[in-house]
Amino acid sequence: MAGQEVAGHGTAPAERSVIEQRGLYVDELTVGAVYAHRPGRTLTEADNVLFTTLTMNTQALHLDAAWSAEQPFGQRLVNSMLTLATLVGQSVSQLTQGTIVAQLGLTDIVFPKPLFHGDTLYTETEITAVRPSSSRPGQGIVTMAHTGRNQHGEVVATASRSVLMWSSAGQQAAQHSARQGQA
């Protein structure tokens, strides 16, 4: 495509490319592929207290420093539901942003070690299964194994997650239908 002369600025493209960040479509995922999600997320005391109080989890292990100091870990623990939410959340921009239809379920959730205030969570996701949906043309079901490690490389959380995702052709067809319905 030829550019056009812009006064004092040389040649500018006649048309600008816009690249929108998105996750992957079901047809772009390969069983066995592992995605390392970066950057990691350092979970702070403020994160933990806010999440814990927003979710009405009054567990003293998350809120009471004096009481927690006398418990087996000797300090407050990051709420495991915050760990789980961050574990899943770290995968969104790379895998499901704009390409997910629905989360179907989480299973096999394990927290082998706790996270503490100031620990950094790093997540990797392995694609363990991909198949077309039998009832929803243009969509597929993907199963992912999320593994979260702290800054020392210790596994602190694992979970299996199933999601319903668009195929590239399926989402394009749905968007085309939606535009036709608006016309």
Image (spheres, helix red, strand yellow):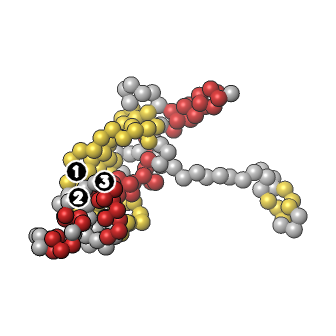
Report the front residue among 56 and 171: 56
SS assignment at label 2: loop
Q: Amino acid at mark 2?
A: Thr
As drawn, the label of residue 109 is 1
Report the front residue among 16 and 57: 57
- Which percent across, then down, holds residue 167? 47, 37
Which residue appears at 77% of the width and 56% of the height? 13
For marks 1 and 2 on the same chain, the one whose residue lies earlier in the sequence = 2
For marks 1 and 3 on the same chain, the one whose residue lies earlier in the sequence = 3
Which residue appears at 25% of the width and 70% of the height? 116
Q: Is residue 124 left or right of residue 13?
A: left
Q: Viewer-nearest of labels 1 and 3?
A: 3
Residue that mark 2 sits on: 58
Residue that mark 3 sits on: 55
Answer above or below: position of 64 versus 30.
below
How far separated are the C-alphas under marks 3 and 2? Answer: 9 Å
Which residue appears at 47% of the width and 48% of the height? 97
